[in-house]
Image (spheres, grey):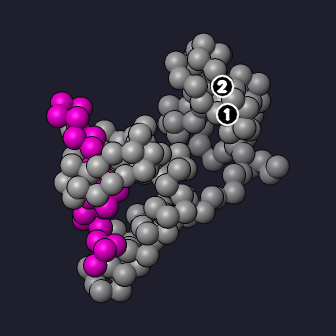
Amino acid sequence: MKWVRRQTNTLKRQRVMRSMFQNKCTCGRPIAIGDLIYYDAATGLVRCYPCGQTIDKLAQEQLIEVVPITDAQRLIDELARLKVLPDSLEKREKLKTCFEQLVSEHSADQEFIVFIRRLLVRAQPALRTSTARKASFCHKCKQSMAEGAVIAWHPRTRAVICILCIQRMLGLPDSLA
């Protein structure tokens, strides 16, 4: 592993807390409800206690881990870069292909769900993002959604919305066109 010295003096410390949900550490170790964990509010990462202690010691020495970028994060960064460019046919095509690739290959990744959640909070603050617990139908387009698919839902009305309708709400090009 590579380590580099952090440039700034302000360190966002992790919090030690008990896990309220079942989760998985970045090292792959399962985290049960009630286990001691390190939670990094800046990144939203949850680490098991031993991994958190290691990262905390390195943070005190002002060292940070150089983490290789994942394919999902690379696509998310590309979407963010394309979103600020002036509107053109080429931009629409690239947005369409990036989003389709992200949905088809990385829809189960936590990075993708967090990305959709952040976009939805800006566009539709009332909606929540989750994965489907069972097969259901989209409230808007009436298409069927499989169990485990990324969905948006409205807590008051309990309406469930599919990824294609989320894509349209966010202003991304329609992948069906």
Along the line of sight, the residue nearer the viewer: 127 or 78: 127
Pick the quarter of the image with the C terminus.
bottom left
**As displayed, is residue 41 above or below residue 137?**
above
Q: Residue sitting at 65 percent across and 16 percent down?
A: 36
Q: Quadrant of residue 19?
A: top right
The amino acid pointed to by label 1 is: Cys
Main SS, magenta region, reads loop
**As displayed, is residue 72 above or below residue 174?**
above
Is label 1 in contact with label 2 (beta carbons under 8 Å)? yes
Locate residue 79 relative to residue 128 in the image: left or right.
right
Q: Residue sitting at 33 percent across and 54 percent down?
A: 144
Locate residue 122 relative to residue 90 in the image: left or right.
left
Q: Residue sitting at 43 percent across and 69 percent down?
A: 100
Locate residue 150 relative to residue 21 in the image: left or right.
left
Q: Quadrant of residue 89?
A: bottom left
Give x and y (percent) for residue 96: 38, 74
Circle number at residue 31: 2
Residue 136 lies in the magenta stretch: no
Can see residue 127?
no
**As displayed, is residue 26 above or below residue 112?**
above
Give the class, few, some or many, for how many residues have Cα within 10 Å of label 2's Cα (few <14, many ≥20): many
Circle number at residue 173: none
Can see residue 70?
yes
Cα–Cα gap, marks 1 and 2: 7 Å
Q: Residue sitting at 28 percent across and 58 percent down?
A: 143
The amino acid pointed to by label 2 is: Ile
Give x and y (percent) for residue 7: 63, 47
Residue 160 lies in the magenta stretch: yes
Magenta-highlighted residues: 153-177
Number of numbered callouts drawn: 2
Circle number at residue 25: 1
